[in-house]
Amino acid sequence: FFFVGGGGGGEESSNKQQQVKFPKRHKDYAALVHVNNYKFKHIAIQEIFGNDKPGSASINESSLEKYVEKGESKLIENFTRRHLLRTYPANSRQDSSNPDPMKSWCVGTQLAALNYQTGDYPMFLNQGKFRDNGHCGYVLKPPYLRDAKINDNPNTVKVTIRPMLGRMLNAPTIDDCDGSYGSSLGCSISLHGIEAYGKYHDPIIFNFKSVRDKEGNHVFSELGSQTKCEFTVNYPEMALIMFEIMSGDETVKSQNAIPLIHLLEGVRQIPLFTVHNDPTLASILCHITFESEGSSSSPRQFVELPKRDPFADPGFDAFQFS
């Protein structure tokens, strides 16, 4: 409940101030107005579990890693099913670098705070994940992170991506005003996901080099024997695929991180963004296939997708070519 201070209203004929009455709020709404904050300690967690009202807590990345290393990730997951948990970068990051938010998301953490002034791959992942659901800033967690009764056995999908062509990769951007990327450009495709229940795994990265054709496009499939990348993905509802274009000195020029559930089979045009998430004219043409138990199977079958206009966000499945 709020305490509302009385204002200097007009006077009645009896020279008494008129009291302003506000309508009563619904009890569920009133309960959401304020969320108590607790220190994230083992004893405090047990106390919160006995409280019907939701609470919140904050821990840094180092503390989160210690809980996971001790095998207490279940404790965090149970906490986040009812309460809010926020993680933030450690104080030792004097250069404003960022921790991988996937480590927080895989145990159910709702709020993974990052240094937004730094354009690095953790920020790319954050931008890609929350580009979902109409950019509203909220993405529904998978069922097994919301309900302890849900079976946590992973769904496994094999993803094959073959980069074919890079278009407009030398186009000027806000971050590269002269537009001179040069002729030597590389493409990096990486998987960011979960190895086992609540266990983060390091990114799996495939690197490709390009050859310029006569029209100025960058052809990725003509150089060397490595023409495609294959990923075996556990928990596809939590995985992201990152596409990066790098110059000769391995500086990231453009990127796009896409939730795996929003990749569709076929020949796809992947739009690219700058390191600060501004749109560009650049894109990568890729051929994408899925396999699940020996058959073609989209990872979308494993998730609850909100109803939305597929053309509302060009970062996902707006472009398809036959």
Image (cartoon, helix red, strand yellow):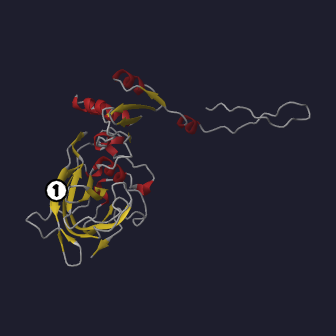
Amino acid type at mark 1: Phe
Residue identified by numbered label 1:
206
Q: Is residue 158 above or below residue 98?
A: below
Q: Residue at x 28, y 64 (%)?
A: 264
Among the 4 quarters of the image, the one containing residue 284 = bottom left
Label 1: element kind: strand
Seen from this angle, which residue lies furthest right? 13
The image shows residue 265 at horizontal and vertical percentages of: 25, 66
Q: Between 142 and 187, which is closer to the camera in this rendering?
A: 187
Q: Residue at x 46, y 29 (%)?
A: 37
Number of labels in the image equals 1
Q: Is residue 9 above or below residue 261?
A: above
Q: Is residue 218 left or right of residue 225?
A: right
The image shows residue 220 at horizontal and vertical percentages of: 17, 67
Q: Residue at x 39, y 49 (%)?
A: 139
- Residue 269 visible, this orientation: no
The image shows residue 318 at horizontal and vertical percentages of: 36, 67
Instruction: Give the class, few, some or many, for how many residues have Cα within 10 Å of label 1's Cα (few <14, many ≥20).
Output: some
Q: Between 85 and 62, which is closer to the camera in this rendering?
A: 62
Q: Is residue 164 left or right of residue 117?
A: left
Q: Residue at x 11, y 68 (%)?
A: 223
Q: Is residue 120 above or below residue 178?
A: above
Seen from this angle, which residue lies furthest top? 43
Seen from this angle, which residue lies furthest bottom? 214
- Residue 158 visible, this orientation: yes
The image shows residue 171 at horizontal and vertical percentages of: 32, 68
Q: Where the N terminus falls, by quadrant?
A: top right
Q: Where the C terminus falls, by quadrant?
A: bottom left
Q: Between 211 and 309, which is closer to the camera in this rendering?
A: 211
